Image (cartoon, rainbow, N blue to C red):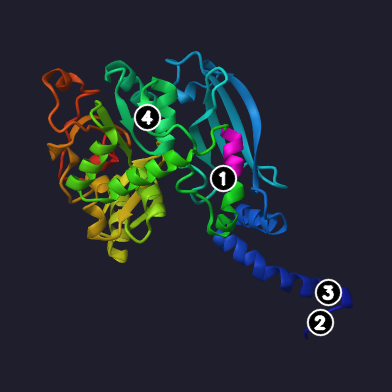
Amino acid sequence: MTASLTPNRRAQSRWFDRLLPPLGILLVTGGLVLLGGYAWLLLTPDEAPYRYQLAATGKVDDYPDLELEAWPDLTINQYDIHLEGTDQPIAQAWFGQRANQPQVLLNWKNETREPLLALDQKAAELSALATAIDKYAPRDALLLSWWDTSRQLALLTGRDVLFHSTLHEPLIVPPEWQAHAQAIRAYENEQTGAAADPQERELFLRFTQSLLNPLASGLADLRQLAGTRDAYLIVHISDLYKLGLLYPDKFGIAYKPYRLTGNLHGMISHVKTEMSNHGYYAYTVQSLSDELIRAFFLTDEASYHTLLARLLPFTSQPSPLELTSPRLVYQQGGYWVYQLAEKAPEAQTQHNLQPAPDHDKTTDSTHLTDQVQ
């Protein structure tokens, strides 16, 4: 015999039935926080959906994980990034600042399931790169790199760079936030105190288009940007993702995070299965921590024949170590640094920032070390 529902129970049942569909959607997508931000944006479309909240300010010794001991004059500002109406931060950010200059983002920790505003990477990689540049690169050298890397290296090394302002290209936000990109860019400019320079934005467009070109023509374009100066091109594995966001119709890139376990060969098998299932052309990986990596997949062969892809290591493809031009002068973690001069004078040939390591060019296991990512 089936017991009939009392009116109160029927009301509870209707309420529960109404709750299940949206609750299921939220649990499946895992986007509780970002969906909340989207709803908030619908009500206040002229504001960014998040806020930087200063959590602490100190010297570099107070933040040993950043490994910035070589720059004791820096002030470090740590921020928690919150969506309106939430207690838990969606990200954490560490900015470096010298005197009254604009602050520069040096490290970012994302707490959501998709890239947001900036991409995570190992803090030690940046400090190691800056140390090598400060020690070996000529004082008048020009550094060519993505705008965010440029600002970091300008702060830490004092070398000249092409991009000093925050360009926010690409703007890494969920699709639902793209309609509010102007408000987000304005808020980010306010946070850093370094608004985008229109001339630098145009120059950055030329820089990124050079990375899309084939190896020879892309290098020629970059040498035009550098002029006659001693110049170094600095690329990072994560630049692949950013180039794909800027030019989705010209550069095919996909990504997927993987958690490291004791079975490395099993993890490699999962990566290869992903590539096979989707028909991807090649892959490389970035080490985010001792427990997590991010795999980047080129979706087609044409994307591999761009300058940026040729300068980074991909499975089953020729190693960048085999290139004779440009000349590799430093490699650690996700960073690869090349001297742009086609035929450097004899005195300049000693400007290796660090001897490039020897790698096995054929096995996938080399891509799981801190040297080849």
Q: Is 3 drawn above or below residue 236 in the view shown?
A: below
Which residue in the structure is indicated by mark 2?
A: 3
Crowding at label 1, few (<14), some or many (≥20) Cα neighbours within 10 Å?
A: some
Quadrant in the rendering for residue 342: top left
Circles 2 and 3: CB atoms closer than 8 Å? no
Residue visible at 64% across and 48% down in the picture: 48
User: If you read the primary sequence from the N terminus, does the residue marked by circle 4 or circle 1 appear first?
Assistant: 4
Which residue in the structure is indicated by mark 4?
A: 161
Q: CA distance from mark 2 to mark 3?
A: 16 Å
Q: CA distance from mark 2 to mark 4?
A: 76 Å
Circles 4 and 1: CB atoms closer than 8 Å? no
Q: Amino acid at mark 2?
A: Ala
Q: Is 169 drawn above or below residue 164 in the view shown?
A: below
The quarter of the image holding the C terminus is top left
Callout 1: SS: helix
Which residue in the structure is indicated by mark 1?
A: 185
Q: Amino acid at mark 1?
A: Arg
Crowding at label 2, few (<14), some or many (≥20) Cα neighbours within 10 Å?
A: few
Callout 4: SS: strand
The residue range painted magenta reads 185-192
In front: label 3 or label 4: 4
Most common SS among magenta residues:
helix
Crowding at label 4, few (<14), some or many (≥20) Cα neighbours within 10 Å?
A: many
Q: CA distance from mark 3 to mark 1?
A: 46 Å
In front: label 1 or label 2: 1
In front: label 3 or label 1: 1
